[in-house]
Amino acid sequence: MNRHDLSKAVYEAHGGIPFGEAQRIVDIMFDTIKSRLVRGEKVLLSGFGCFRVVRRKQRNGVDPQSGRPILIVGRRAVTFRPSKHLKSL
């Protein structure tokens, strides 16, 4: 499923709005989620799951092409934990 599919689902569920408006609603939702994650806040969608930003530590790795050791720098990453309602599906 992609952004277009989500927009189509919103459009079909609320047939009174134009498809362009459904796309705008989906875009606003994603922009809001992204902006909260950039600020380091967690995003909880009840019944779906929780997105949160975690800090990955610097670690050693191996270059798969050459086999040489490399240093993987630390970074921020987004994790997702599904709701217990999703786990039972």
Image: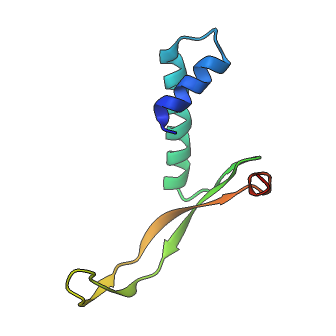
Left or right of residue 74: residue 42? right
Counting from the top left corner in percent of width and height, residue 12 is at 62, 18
Closer to us: 61 or 54:
61
* Numbered marks: total: 0
Q: How is the image coloured?
A: rainbow
Q: Is residue 67 above or below residue 42?
A: below
> Residue at the spot x=54%, y=21% of the render?
22
- Furthest-left residue in view? 66
> Residue at the spot x=53%, y=26% of the render?
7
Closer to us: 52 or 84:
84
Counting from the top left corner in percent of width and height, residue 27 is at 49, 32
- Furthest-front residue in view? 89
> Residue at the spot x=79%, y=52% of the render?
85
Q: Is residue 66 above or below residue 24?
A: below
Counting from the top left corner in percent of width and height, residue 48 is at 71, 48
Left or right of residue 76: residue 8? right
Q: Is residue 20 above or below residue 38?
A: above
Left or right of residue 60: residue 76? right
> Residue at the spot x=60%, y=60% of the render?
52
Left or right of residue 23: residue 62? left
Counting from the top left corner in percent of width and height, residue 11 is at 58, 19
